[in-house]
Image (cartoon, coloured by chain):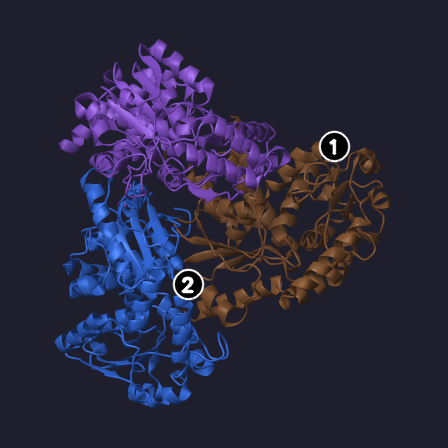
Chain colours: A brown, B purple, C blue
Amino acid sequence: MNKGKKQSNLEERIEGIKLLRPSLHGKDFLLTWEKSDEDLKTVLEVASVLKEMRAANISPRVFDSGLAISNFRDNSTRTRFSFASASNLLGLAVQDLDEEKSQIAHGETVRETANMISFLSDFIGIRDDIFLGEGNKYMREVGVVLDEGFENGVLPVRPGIVNLQCDMDHPTQSMADLMHLLSVFGSADNLSGKKLVMSWAYSPSYGKPMSVPQGIIALMSRFGMNIELAYPEGYNLIPGIVELAEKNTLASGGSFSVSHSMEEAMKDADIVYPKSWAPYHIMQQRTGLLQKADRNGLKELEQVCLANNAKFRDWEFDDDKLKLTRNGSALYMHCLPADISGISCERGEVSASTFERYRIETYREAGFKPYVIAAMMLTNRFENPGEVLSAIMQRNRGRVGVN
Amino acid sequence: MNKGKKQSNLEERIEGIKLLRPSLHGKDFLLTWEKSDEDLKTVLEVASVLKEMRAANISPRVFDSGLAISNFRDNSTRTRFSFASASNLLGLAVQDLDEEKSQIAHGETVRETANMISFLSDFIGIRDDIFLGEGNKYMREVGVVLDEGFENGVLPVRPGIVNLQCDMDHPTQSMADLMHLLSVFGSADNLSGKKLVMSWAYSPSYGKPMSVPQGIIALMSRFGMNIELAYPEGYNLIPGIVELAEKNTLASGGSFSVSHSMEEAMKDADIVYPKSWAPYHIMQQRTGLLQKADRNGLKELEQVCLANNAKFRDWEFDDDKLKLTRNGSALYMHCLPADISGISCERGEVSASTFERYRIETYREAGFKPYVIAAMMLTNRFENPGEVLSAIMQRNRGRVGVN
Amino acid sequence: MNKGKKQSNLEERIEGIKLLRPSLHGKDFLLTWEKSDEDLKTVLEVASVLKEMRAANISPRVFDSGLAISNFRDNSTRTRFSFASASNLLGLAVQDLDEEKSQIAHGETVRETANMISFLSDFIGIRDDIFLGEGNKYMREVGVVLDEGFENGVLPVRPGIVNLQCDMDHPTQSMADLMHLLSVFGSADNLSGKKLVMSWAYSPSYGKPMSVPQGIIALMSRFGMNIELAYPEGYNLIPGIVELAEKNTLASGGSFSVSHSMEEAMKDADIVYPKSWAPYHIMQQRTGLLQKADRNGLKELEQVCLANNAKFRDWEFDDDKLKLTRNGSALYMHCLPADISGISCERGEVSASTFERYRIETYREAGFKPYVIAAMMLTNRFENPGEVLSAIMQRNRGRVGVN
């Protein structure tokens, strides 16, 4: 009976998906702000249904064969496994493309490689977050090449591209974070009016991408929340994306502010996301130095940057700062791994006791990512994802068991 | 007709499995000595049935999707391929976790990583055999973390852990070796009263784990055999495991002895397992030095150890020693690769002509490992493995062919 | 209706395959010149049907589980992905064997490793093209070992070997190139009388294998074409293979000539394949130096070789040379990646504008390779590939979708 109820609930939700009118079919997922509200809602709903199916031992496999290429131009464990999990859930085998990480490939190399790896591929997941102004551009370049290959009969299918983190956005992270918020607060409506603080936090490391904070403010600003972006002076993000977030809040009935005190920002916050990043102007200089392969320049810049970071060692999220939040119990979020004081480093983004309170929550937060990626794939490949999910329910094949 | 007979034989054996009462369901497989006789019998029988099914082109696939994580903290080709084969046979895709090999991870890193890789994973196979006192401990730490993740709703399934070699035991090896013995001698009853010599053998290398000899004496001592453990003075194993083996032989009606002459030990042996290992006290010192990252200390220890090994160059298993065994034709065993004199090294564990006599046998011995691992997985995931195997027979899907 | 027509066309072609009498079943694919015309025709037809099936969303999966081992003893992206794609299309999971690239393994290491990785494997794809006289020999050594393992009950199935490039031939490349020719010219009959120029071209790199030009002249000479092999004096290929190509042309009604001027060769050519390679005598010296690990010798040889190459910088295929060909529009071919002047190097095998004319064509050419490999696998494993393809049509399972 319990199972029957769960399934009828699933079927209801799938009916809801059928009413949505996304335009995700055949489109790459590169930036959340290129996607309509209907698009985002569809991805979130499909992700949520896939998660429940998996839990109910219903296999949502829709590929009998096919490759998903993972192209990580920067290190990753979490996202790599999420991509592998999503691909596998839908029936695709992952094949890694090992490009040299420090290389900015353009032109013929990209054109050729993108075609050569895609003859029997359905998706390419790309992480390219090191060079400012390059990562997202690279993904688009690959997209144009794949279009050309498909139009000219080189490729039987146009593989979809999933942005697994670039210099601008980290959409699989921000969408997983949003799923987490929806799960904690119950609905999108409940997010309206909440205060979310995206705050810089101290870290003894250097060169952390800006894509997470940028992705968070650009996405969360669309739900009527009051977004506060806090960072020490000088640690600003890409200006255009901050402007976009501001516009979003106005349009969605929320507000947007920038401040330069972690304490001030935390006051009455409902949701806090303390996370380190390297400042925009540093990332600009770093990109220039990397492109010139100026090793000494890079070393110097690292020293300057670390010395500057050190002035803001008090930007650690700890129990005292937690007390300042709404009822002293704001939801703490992090994309992981966090720099935890006394654990992963002497002093970092978050105190050990504060992190421990939310540790399991951050794991749950991360657990949405495989389903977000799978939903991006499913909605890219199928025009009517709701119909596909219905067919999966009908087929009723167990993920585990003798079918 | 022949095929009909084979299948009815398979079905009979599956009926036998249904009568067993193992408690393997949901339990990690970390040490054979934590498992009951019924547990071991179940794994062996399931492995044997899976092997016959594969040979009869019956696909035992029970996962429509799912990941099996391989976490090799030491090099491996044989076990890596066995794990990949077992996972694939059951329908799981292998995803490698590349941790730095020399690193002893604990605490938050283990907690976080174990959860992050497990959202859609069914099994984690771990090899961690370098640090004495650490490998098995690490696996248990991962297990506790996975329990926590599952209980807190982070993980939809509690992934099972398979020990692919640790500092204490190498259960997939010893169980495969046992399957080989059963296949050569016909039954467990026939092993009773046989003399098995687990002997140290000379090798020009240093730091070989003790897990194989320890695993062999701890497991084979449960079948009424007369176990003789032979090694040059000073090359002893972890004392607690030797005591355990001794107790086992008493309980099973066999005997246990330690000797310090290869020749003496080989007399009237039915089964011989000549294999090099580093002594317990060396492994203790080595672990300490590794933990301090004391490179010079490690180099010195290696010199001392190799110089000591060199005193026992006559601990080579050759045709003369073979002649001393029962009818001059004991069964020679090795986990491979063997250090073969004149082939893989100037002088090693076994002479070239002796090894050649048994070469094909050692390959057969190794061939049981994929099925042992698959059986560990199947019995972990399903409460009634016999019922599952019956359902697989009923389904009758070919592994190769157009189904 | 259109789809109905396509399918009936597919079924007709499959009926045609049933009439062929290849002897590919259970045989490794190591050199095209060991295969009969009927063998080659079967592989090409099966490949072509698989390609159409894929395009028509018909899944040709014939393995419910099984491993395909990729053993790349030299770098590769294109062929690695082609092998992965072919394996995946048929239902096999790829497992990489990471052997040290510079090592010439023989004897016990080969015997043991080949068995250890093959317990549940169906195919081993090998690239071994660095050492002259070694690569193909290594593949045969592996084959003998696998025969032994299978005959002795070590292996339940004798894995098939696919040559993914050796010192002598590159059959998956040449067969894909042939499929491209058939697709461009319409039929094998139409190739008769055509002039194909396999020409050396300038490259600023050193040590490129001879397997592509050798594979091309050995295969294309079997179709009544007039083959011209052009290279600067001294850049000859393995003599025996050139003799073989000459014999083939005589038998097939074509002609064979060798010339030492790119311009002369290009006159009235229908098909041109300008591609760099290292001369036979250099590869001989290089192999000797590599075997002795003579680093200084290798450096010197590289200098000598590059200096010699530099004398032939005018061996670039450009628009002027293209004008010399039949109607100024011969089909340009390349195995990719090409050394493109001003793009991948200052000056290379082909001018940028000439390459750009044919860029998409070269991508299409490469796109046949996954299907050629899949066809080699299918015809190795199944005695009646036509029957298998019929059964796949009957089953009518979608590659993408909810089956």
> Residue C103 appears in which quarter of the rendering?
bottom left
Element at label 2: helix
In what element is the residue under mark 1? Answer: helix
Q: Which residue is mark 1?
A: A353
The amino acid on which the numbered mark 1 sits, given as a three-letter code, is Ser
The image shows residue C256 at horizontal and vertical percentages of 20, 80
Q: Chain of mark 2?
A: C
Tell me residue C33's x, y (percent).
19, 65
Q: Position of residue B317 (x, y in %)?
A: 27, 31
Tell me which residue sits at (84%, 37%) in the image.
A324
What residue is rendered at 43% in x and 36% in y?
Answer: B306
**Vertical order, B128 against C321 (above or below):** above
Residue located beneath label 2 in the image: C295
The chain under label 1 reads: A
Residue B75: where, in percent of width, then height? 44, 41
Q: Nearer the viewer, residue C129 or B114?
A: C129
Residue C140's disc is none
